[in-house]
Image (tube, helix red, strand yellow):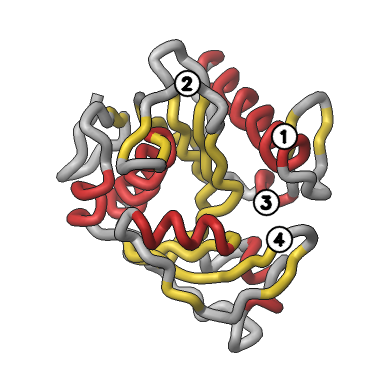
Amino acid sequence: MQILAISKPRNIEEAQLLRSHHQLRARVFSDRLGWEVNVVGGCESDTFDDLQPTYILAVSSNDRVVGCARLLPALGPTMVANVFPSLLSAGHLDAHSSMVESSRFCVDTFLAESRGDGSIHEATLTMFAGIIEWSVANRYTEIVTVTDLRFERILARVGWPLQRIGEPRPIEATVAVAGTLPAKADTFMRLRPANYRSQIISTFGQSA
């Protein structure tokens, strides 16, 4: 499984991968979770996709997008600050230049992929490692995100616990919580699966 980081697609292949990622988001957030999100032509997107984010994609050996996340600098508009301020104990995000937001994280858990760390999908661990590798390579030290309590438990189980910055609150059909995660090289080394491959240029990752 390989990690790609795409901002503006440079060729047809990258454009197709980004479309596949929007389709995965539609299947997960609209079809499976029942969120009220904007789906057009089988693709999910929102206004934050217009801000030139970086997309972290986990791509299988048969070129299928099996995981994705969207990264935006925390000093600009973000979901946690602009959509979910009620989840912040201070009512606002104490953002800084070394903080990046991760949003729209999802994994296609229906694929018959191998798993790592017991019940944790290999694609999930690959995504964790890819987000950390890209963050460190771009001099981010902290990742802020909004997630649900189930996913918070997964983060704790793999040894990457969420530091809450507010109390959990009901959001639509789930209970959400905002928090931060450290972006460190040793965390990347611990979480990455054995067959992890990446096209992210870093001082500690395996680039392809």
Q: How far apart are the alpha carbons under marks 2 and 1?
A: 20 Å
Eye-nearest disc, 3 or 4: 4
Say which residue appears at 44% left-offset and 31% top-offset.
58
Residue type (three-letter) at the residue carrying disc 3: Phe
Q: Which residue is mark 4?
A: 174
Q: How far apart are the alpha carbons under marks 3 and 4?
A: 21 Å
Q: Which residue is mark 2?
A: 112
- Tag 3 or tag 1, which sits nearer the N-term? 1
User: Are discs 1 and 3 less than 8 Å apart at CB?
Assistant: no
**Mark 2 Cα shell of 10 Å, populated few (<14), some (14-19), many (≥20):** few
Residue type (three-letter) at the residue carrying disc 2: Ala
- Tag 1 or tag 2, which sits nearer the N-term? 1
* Rendering coords of residue 75 (x, y %): 53, 68
Eye-nearest disc, 2 or 1: 2
Q: How far apart are the alpha carbons under marks 3 and 2?
A: 31 Å
Q: Which residue is mark 3?
A: 48
Q: Which residue is mark 1?
A: 26
